[in-house]
């Protein structure tokens, strides 16, 4: 990913100083953040984050669409195709499906620390924009009713991020590449190192043991953008 220089933003937006200030403020708030949205790319590391889920630690947000896919697949095996294709878009690493299913089925273990993102929780404008604009043809569920799986999930991740201001945890750049062409994305270079370290240690115990995995934080900021009114800022360790 190429780094955007702050001075370049002067030519793109009317209030670059305010925007830069907002990114810095949001990044510094991560040190005290108690919530995080899980991008699909983080699912291979759920066994590690589960250590936090079972303790007195932060809440993790997951699109309710993922849970619905699991429940549907138990009734109709065609849904396993969509689930597999969806996961392979974001990661090629092994995902423990039993662990993931446990987040939705065995609520006595996960209920307090994992919250499903529903349409009622998201910024409606952001969700509608994402649902209409992010489409993967092999992930349109032709089973009745017709459903845009990718647009729904991206809409819920960005929609709840915008409304709740909770950060997004990612381990690949797939979400970033998906939205880059339609929503402004800015990188913070290597700023806020201490804040990032504190944040990651709280949300991903034993993160030093995860070799070859690049953890990224995404946060939304408000700018004068006519379509969705947000930019996704990437804090890249």
Image (cartoon, grey):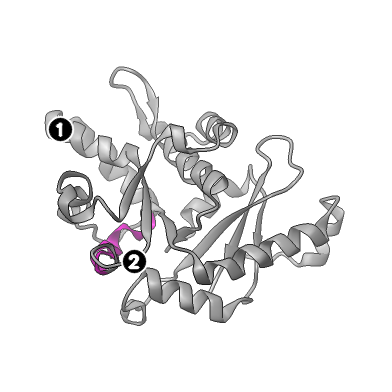
Question: Where, quadrant-wise, is the N terminus in this rendering?
Answer: bottom right
Magenta range: 41-51
Return the residue at label 1: 77
* Position in image of residue 103 (x %, y %): 22, 50
Q: Residue furthest top?
A: 144
> Is 44 inside the magenta-drawn segment?
yes
Q: Is residue 3 above or below residue 135?
A: below
- In depth, the one of 44 and 113 nearer the eye is 113
**Numbered label attached to residue 5:** none
Residue 186 counted in the magenta span: no
Write the residue at 65% across / 38% down.
Answer: 228
Distance between the Cα atoms at labels 2 and 1?
A: 35 Å
Closer to us: 96 or 105: 105
- Label 1 neighbourhood size at 10 Å, few (<14), some (14-19), many (20+)? few
Q: Earlier in the sequence, mark 2 or mark 1?
A: 2
In the picture, measured across the screen, residue 228 lies left or right of residue 56, that is: right
Location of residue 177 in the rendering, given as x and y in whole percent from the top left corner = 54, 52
Residue in the picture at 26% in, 40% down = 67
SS for dot 1? loop
Marks 2 and 1 in Cβ contact (< 8 Å): no
Residue 51 image position (x, y, % from top left):
25, 69
- Residue nearest the viewer, comparing 228 with 18: 18
Identify the image quadrant of residue 71: top left
For disc 2, the neighbor class at 10 Å (few under 14, some 14 to 19, many from 20) is: some
Q: Main secondary structure of the magenta part?
A: helix
Q: Return the residue found at the far front.
A: 56
Residue at 30 percent across and 56 percent down: it is 113
Q: Can you identify the residue that label 2 sits on?
A: 57
Q: Is residue 84 above or below residue 32?
A: above
* Marks 2, 1: nearer the viewer: 2
Residue in the picture at 55% in, 70% down: 236
């Amino acid at each position: 990913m190429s780094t955007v220089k702050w001075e370049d933003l002067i030519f793109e937006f009317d209030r670059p100083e305010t925007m830069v200030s907002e990114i810095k403020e949001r990044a510094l708030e991560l040190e005290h953040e108690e919530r995080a949205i899980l991008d699909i790319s983080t699912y291979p590391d759920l066994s590690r984050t589960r250590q936090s889920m079972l303790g007195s630690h932060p809440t993790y947000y997951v699109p309710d669409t993922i849970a619905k896919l699991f429940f549907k697949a138990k009734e109709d095996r065609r849904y396993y195709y969509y689930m597999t294709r969806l996961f392979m878009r974001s990661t090629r690493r092994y995902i423990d499906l039993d662990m993931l299913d446990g987040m939705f089925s065995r609520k006595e273990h996960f209920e307090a620390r994992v919250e499903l993102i529903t349409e009622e929780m998201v910024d409606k404008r952001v969700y509608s924009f994402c649902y209409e604009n992010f489409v993967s043809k092999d992930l349109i569920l032709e089973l009745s009713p017709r459903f845009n799986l990718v647009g729904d999930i991206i809409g819920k991740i960005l929609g709840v991020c915008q409304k709740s201001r909770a950060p997004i945890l990612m381990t690949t750049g797939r979400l970033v590449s998906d939205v880059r062409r339609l929503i402004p994305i800015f990188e913070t270079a290597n700023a806020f190192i201490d804040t990032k370290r504190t944040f990651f240690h709280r949300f991903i115990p034993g993160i030093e043991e995860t070799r070859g995995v690049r953890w990224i934080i995404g946060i939304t900021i408000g700018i004068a953008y006519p379509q969705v009114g947000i930019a996704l800022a990437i804090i890249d360790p």
